Image: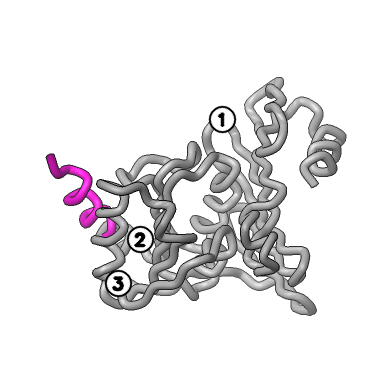
Amino acid sequence: AEVAIRRELERLAPDHGIVGEEFASKPANGRYRWVVDPIDGTRAFIMGYPVWGTLIGLLHDETPLLGIMDQPFTRERFWSEGGVAYGRWAGCERQRLATRPCPSLDAAVFSTTHPDLFAAGREAEAFAALKARTRMTRYGGDCYAYCLLAAGYVDIIFETGLKPHDIVALIPIVEGAGGAISTWTGEPATQGGAILATGDKRLHEAALGVLGGVLSRG
């Protein structure tokens, strides 16, 4: 899959750089880089759970310009275009995506890929502190959970250990739907790492407040 994507990108935009999960990066002759994950959610793919997807994002320097998450098995696609996020389900016309209002943690639906991915110590403490304040938790969403957040079904996504190819394509989808996404300390999410995404920007501030209290402990 990555070979096919790279081949097409090199044909259409030969001066652009390419960063992928499976192969060495291709340097850019300019300021544009494509960031590719051919199968995000490998465990879900192996087990037949249709929450994996193909991620393709475009960076201008360090700013995400557009992104796409394609789920070929269910024929669903989520993408950003001109600062707006869209979704298309099998047999349906495209629909504009919008996150839902949820200003308080106690009303939020919380998602993460798996609790075992948080390292013992501060990471696990941060996960437990945020999870304890939310209304409901669901595991196993991978990249699909970010698109559900953009579509208004999920309120908080909390993850760690992500690489740039795991997240770059999802940033403009979340933001184009009205959500917020950053690291746990409020920095840009383009380099991956510990990621917090919310549908409501007020919820993002509330979650950062909880995380700041945990991460600042001596």
Residue at the (68%, 42%) spot, across then down: 36
Can residue 56 be seen here? Answer: yes
**Would you say the magenta stretch is mainly helix, strand or loop?**
helix
Specify which label sits upstream in the sequence, 2 or 1.
1
Q: CA distance from mark 3 to mark 2?
A: 16 Å
Query: Whole-percent x and y of residue 150?
Result: 52, 66
91 up-or-down from 66: above or below: below
Q: Give the farthest residue toward the left.
A: 218
Residue at coordinates 17% horizontally, 43% vertically from top-left? 216
Q: Secondary structure at mark 1?
A: loop
Asked where in the image residue 86 lies, by quadrant, the reply is: bottom right
Does 148 lie within the magenta span? Answer: no
Q: Are marks 3 and 2 in contact (CB under 8 Å)?
A: no
Contact between marks 2 and 1 (CB within 8 A): the answer is no
The first of marks 3 and 2 along the sequence is 3
Callout 2 crowding tier (Cα within 10 Å): few <14, some 14–19, many ≥20 = some
Q: Is residue 99 above or below residue 14?
A: below
Residue receiving disc 3: 134
> Is residue 217 highlighted in magenta?
yes
- Which residue is pictured at 87% across the width and 34% down the height? 11
> What distance separates the C-alpha of mark 2 from that of mark 1?
25 Å
Q: Which residue occupies 71% across, 20% down? A: 29
Q: Nearer the viewer, residue 67 or 51?
A: 51
Name the side, left or right, on which 114 lies relative to 10. left
